[in-house]
Amino acid sequence: MASMATFFTQTSFPSHSLSKTFDTHFAAAPKVNACVSFRARRQVGLRVSSGLIEPDGGKLVELVVRDSERDLKKGEALSLPRIKLSRIDLQWVHVLSEGWATPLKGFMKEAEFLQTLHFNSLRLGDGSVVNMSVPIVLAIDDAQKHRIGDNKRVALFDSKGDPVAILNDIEIYKHPKEERIARTWGTTASGLPYVEQTITNAGNWLIGGDLEVIEPIKYNDGLDHFRLSPAELRSEFTRRNADAVFAFQLRNPVHNGHALLMTDTRRRLLEMGYKNPVLLLHPLGGYTKADDVPLDWRMKQHEKVLEDGVLDPETTVVSIFPSPMHYAGPTEVQWHAKARINAGANFYIVGRDPAGMSHPVEKRDLYDADHGKKVLSMAPGLERLNILPFRVAAYDKTQGKMAFFDPSRPQDFLFISGTKMRTLARNKESPPDGFMCPGGWKVLVDYYDSLLPSSNGKVPEAVPA
């Protein structure tokens, strides 16, 4: 996501995105004009729909076995052919096990893989369509394929040699790496971070099947209490009596432009007639590239944002989204939005160049900055989700704070890019007052300070999160 928050721009697409007046439709509303503004709603006495949005397919698919079966499944796993999971493979097991990819029941078989690559969606048995834009697959090499032989079940083990899951009713098929890369990223240029981590040197086969995950995935990194599953998030939203949930994903520190966007979103939802809209602040917690701020530091910064009162803890749920990051732009942002449906969100905030990155070879952005929000507004299987594009926010020098950009006085605004923000933090310089809360900024400065050479002259190496 781009460094500057943006908010509620109108789109000309016939879609399920919301305009400045939040014109939209609600499936649970009375059968009158489906696209009606909030003002018209008040005039005719309409009520906005309440309650959490249903998961894709109508039921959350959770794949962790019952406690009573755990020892039995561990014993079964020890007797089966083994596949060792990479760190990113384990993150995908985590995603699948909790139901983020509902209705998937495990790693994709070939039919699901092809639908994802070619249609960005899956057709269910009843004929309905759900969004699925990134392949969730497990690669194996020739030797592993040979060892599996005619077995219809395999066991998945982590790097420590512990059994994680059993994959049942397996199907092995060719791994079309070039086509997968081209269709997911729109380029086969070298230097794509996720590709280099997981695809380039991966096996030439993919193995799909139904997962039985032996126990909940834990990382024991001090952050597991932030990793709420879709079911746990739904319970928390219900406990807070939320009648709307608006999700905001980020992989960067929160500045006051982001906060302006989120608080203004809640204000507008209240104007629509919702009584208690709740924000899901949902930082991505799986693999990220080495130059992104690591998850543990980002969570420290997010906590300071709440402590300093920039966001209201009573109406904000902070949780970690366990998915790895592809940096696949408009293709990937569909996955980010779809997963939040399964967690109960019925509004999704999308910014400029979501899930984007610089071109790995050429000096330009890899994706058009506006395509993410446009694609989301038309994406198959996301019709139930209200997409909230947003307009640019920047530092207003006349007010000394972040504000929505006013094109009639551009000279009054200062744009602080992510690169500029990181440079200031590395140099222990302060941004303009009002750009970020002091506690949050100190965390960012401390992170970059931790990368300076230690007393032994060695610089800590930045590694992918």
Image: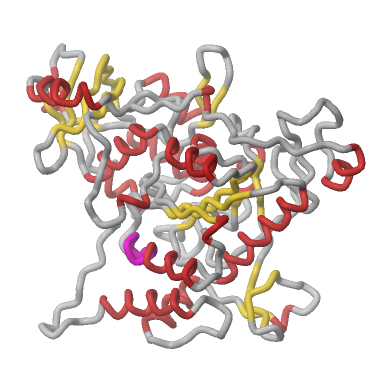
Could you say which quadrant of the image residue 384 lies in?
A: top right
**Residue 9 in the figure: left or right of residue 188:** right
Is residue 63 among what the camera can see? Answer: yes
Q: Is residue 297 magenta?
A: yes
User: What's the image's color scheme?
Assistant: secondary structure
Task: Using the image as rendered, state which of residue 171 and residue 49 is in the foreground.
Answer: 49
Rendered position, 185 above or below 457? above
Q: Would you identify the image quadrant in which residue 462 lies? A: bottom left
Out of 247 and 368, give the one closest to the viewer: 247
Image location of residue 233, percent across then percent down: 46, 42
In the image, the segment drawn in magenta is: 292-298
Q: Looking at the rendering, in which quadrant would you find the C terminus?
A: bottom left
Residue 326: horizontal and vertical position, in percent?
40, 47
Residue 160 vs 267, above or below: the answer is above
Magenta stretch: includes residue 6: no
Q: Residue at x 39, y 75 (%)?
A: 444
Residue closest to the eye, 74 or 376 = 74
